[in-house]
Image (cartoon, grey):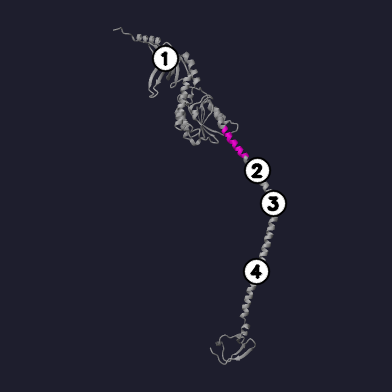
Amino acid sequence: MEAPLSLFDLNALVKRSLSQCLPDEYWVQAELSDVRSNATGHCYLEFIQKDPRSNNLIAKARGTVWANVYRMLKPYFEETTGQAFTSGIKVLVKVTVEFHELYGYNLTVCDIDPTYTLGDMARRRREILKQLEEEGVLTLNKELEIPVLPQRIAVISSSTAAGYGDFCHQLQNNSHGFFFYTELFPALMQGNQVEESVLAALDAVNARLHQFDVVVIIRGGGATSDLSGFDTYLLAASCAQFPLPIITGIGHERDDTVLDSVAHTRVKTPTAAAEFLINRMEEAAEVLENLSEQLRAGVLLRLEQEKRRLWMAQNRIPSLVASRLSEAKMQLLTTKKDLSQAVTSLFIKQKHRLELLHQRVNDASPERLLNRGYSITLKKGKAIIDAAQLTEGDVLTTRLAKGEVSSTVTSKNV
């Protein structure tokens, strides 16, 4: 049996072996975990790798970024990627493999390639946007109509952000004097709680949906590395399906987050968001001015047309009166002629009727009857038609066609 080694001796052997086998620097792909720095400026972290199908850890290593490297590496990485150097991101780092008798296996970072992280961030953004598209919600917010007069504005921002103050000042001091009502729904715009905080603010706006026309999400200043909080699926899905148009002004001109991609309108800064709303009001005012001018021109044109029409009607009055008088005169003459003919016809009819009546009267006259051989017996000048009216001794006069005969009643037959 060989002499046993002490733990220190064994670790020293491991250290020498690793130094001999892995003497160079190596580029390693991994995900950051448990990133923390101390007062001395050193950064301590863990590198991990997960199974892409099960998401289970399959590798882990302790890592160190010494202060002299960390002072340059961190701002370079964050300025290039717009992503904070924090847990949860994938990196491509150049490391040396070290083993310490007391602290064990460690990877010391000496360089980093931000383009790898940029590629991974872009891939994650593409995956989120693709998922939203497959779910049919990617463009829902863009399809909403911004009101003609977007005056009631729900603002999601930090209450202490300079950008929020700039936004409100720009609206309140617009050159046209347009009125805007703004209400702040406070949210954290940087750090690990951005997603949770903005979602809570959106829920608060949604509870009072009818009181607002649009939602403005603005972030005044701050490092571009803080934009990662706006690249999450939950926040993007919530904004894409929000029932009010969302305007974002959360980054710089070259930054484009997933939230910007799903929002109705993306502008560069809070001031630009205010200008966008003012321009919408200007467009509405211009439309109203155009309509007012069109109305004025239309009224003047109509008045001119009616004036011309009245003038033409006035000039036509004499000829119309003469024509109407001529027509009335002609109608009167026609009526007079018709009346004369009607009267003549009536007179002829009445004359004929009178002649018939006269003939009938003549035919029924006593003289005509007497000429036919009839006679009339009178008593004291009254005609007798019944023998019962007579008594013996009555003196009667019988009138004939020619002459009269007097007689005395001696007898009668009743």
Between residue 397 and residue 6, name the one nearer to us.
397
**Residue found at the far left of this picture:** 1
User: In 3D space, how far apart are the residues under numbered discs 4 and 3 (Cα atoms)?
Assistant: 42 Å
Q: Nearer the viewer, mark 1 or mark 3?
A: 3
Q: Residues within 10 Å of mark 4 (few under 14, many from 20)?
A: few
Label 2 close to label 4 by CB (< 8 Å) = no
Q: Which residues are magenta?
A: 279-293
Q: Earlier in the sequence, mark 4 or mark 3?
A: 3
Helix, strand or loop at mark 1: strand
Mark 3: give few (<14), some (14-19) or many (20+) Cα within 10 Å.
few
Q: Amino acid under label 4?
A: Ser
- For discs 1 and 4, the disc positioned in front in the rendered view: 4
Tag 1 residue: 107
Say which element carries label 3. Answer: helix
Q: Main secondary structure of the magenta part?
A: helix
Kindly identify which residue carries mark 3: 316
Count of all numbered marks drawn on residues in the image: 4
The Cα atoms of the two marked residues, 2 and 1, are separated by 86 Å
Q: Is residue 202 above or below residue 390?
A: above
